[in-house]
Amino acid sequence: MVAPLTAPSLDQAAPPPGPLHLAIGMFDGVHLGHQAVVETAIHSARPGGGVAAVLTFHPHPSRLFRPDAPTLLLMPLAQKTEFLHQLGVDLVIIQPFTRTFARIEAEDFLGYLKQRLPALAAVYVGENFRFGRGRLGNVATLVAAGKPAGVAVVSVPRLRRNGRAISSTRIRGVLAKGDVAEAGRLLGYSYFCEGEIEPGCRLGRTLGFPTLNLSWEPEASPAYGVYAVRLREAGRRGWRPGVANYGLRPTITSGRGQVRPRLETHLLGRGAAPAEGARVRVEWLSFLRRERKFPSLEALRAQIARDCTAAKNYFKKK
């Protein structure tokens, strides 16, 4: 096994020290279906001293073909790359998705890879993988091109939950409804976000519920509302239970013009909170209610108290 590496393109990927086993895909969110493809490549590479690699693309093709309505991503690129390495991938290749790259004919795609990655021994894709000019290529296209090139092609069946295929699109849909618990079941891990604690207006402290304000601006965001969460500061092991509001805070921002969404987390229980500037990870565990405007700060205070009780009851059942 080699030290984890990241290459900014196929042309800049260093020759691997062994046969290359390459998983290919967008892998947005690295959900359970993606993990099945990637882990198949990893497990196949290990016995023969091979190198497990992932080829992914940036930006998302929709940025090229539908710039006015691009696909909103579940994960930023850096987070996805880190997650793939944590799975055990030796090399992540981030291929720029340009018009030139998009014009490669499907029949020439595997040869294009082999020319740049001479050690390529096998490619691994989901059974629904489409590629090449006009997205005309499929698994059969890869198999036909792989035989004369000496490259094995492995098609991994799609995983399903409740009779439906697991997909990034499906996960975006459940997040938009606030169903972070179902999102976690589809992802194979708790939906999470990371960022630095930033200064707030300290209203939560005035109300008796001090909050940590996270600097976080996702593309595909969860529904505005209140959630049971847990939080961990970078470099520390312990998780802290909490209740978080994600949204526009309409009770206190009404009439203030454009307001950006904010994640505010109130920690449950005792203990010192992370300081401003600290990097934290927040895992979203359960949806409690939608965000709404209250007639007064006193009404807001009473609802926050009920939210804290609901979150504590959630953690008692875990």
Image (cartoon, helix red, strand yellow):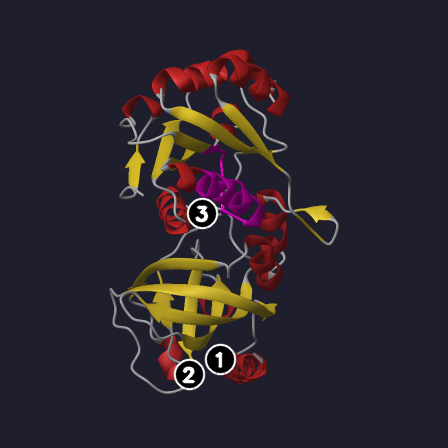
Which callout, 2 or 1, points at the residue further toward the start of the chain? 2
Q: Farthest front residue?
A: 48
Front residue (pair 91, 135): 91
Front residue (pair 247, 201): 247
Which callout, 3 or 2, points at the residue further toward the start of the chain? 3
Which callout, 1 or 3, points at the residue further toward the start of the chain? 3
Residue at screen point 62% across, 60% down: 182
Residue 223 visible in the current orientation = no
In-image side of 45 versus 295 (left or right)? left
Question: Picture coordinates of residue 275 (x, y %)?
Answer: 25, 72
Identify the magenta region.
23-44
Q: Which class describes the residues within 10 Å of circle 1: few (<14), some (14-19), or many (20+)?
A: some
Question: Picture coordinates of residue 119 (x, y %)?
Answer: 36, 24
Question: Picture coordinates of residue 103 (x, y %)?
Answer: 48, 13
Q: Which three-letter amino acid code belongs to the residue tagged 2? A: Leu
Task: Say which element carries label 3.
Answer: loop
In-image side of 279 versus 131 (left or right)? left
Residue at screen point 49% across, 17% down: 109
- According to the picture, the residue beneath numbered tag 1 turns out to be 297
Q: Nearer the viewer, mark 3 or mark 2?
A: 3
Question: Picture coordinates of residue 165 (x, y %)?
Answer: 68, 45
Is residue 186 placed above or below 126 in the rendered structure?
A: below
Are the residues flagged by discs 2 and 1 in contact, CB closer than 8 Å?
yes
Which image quarter holds the C terminus? bottom right
Residue at screen point 44% across, 32% down: 22
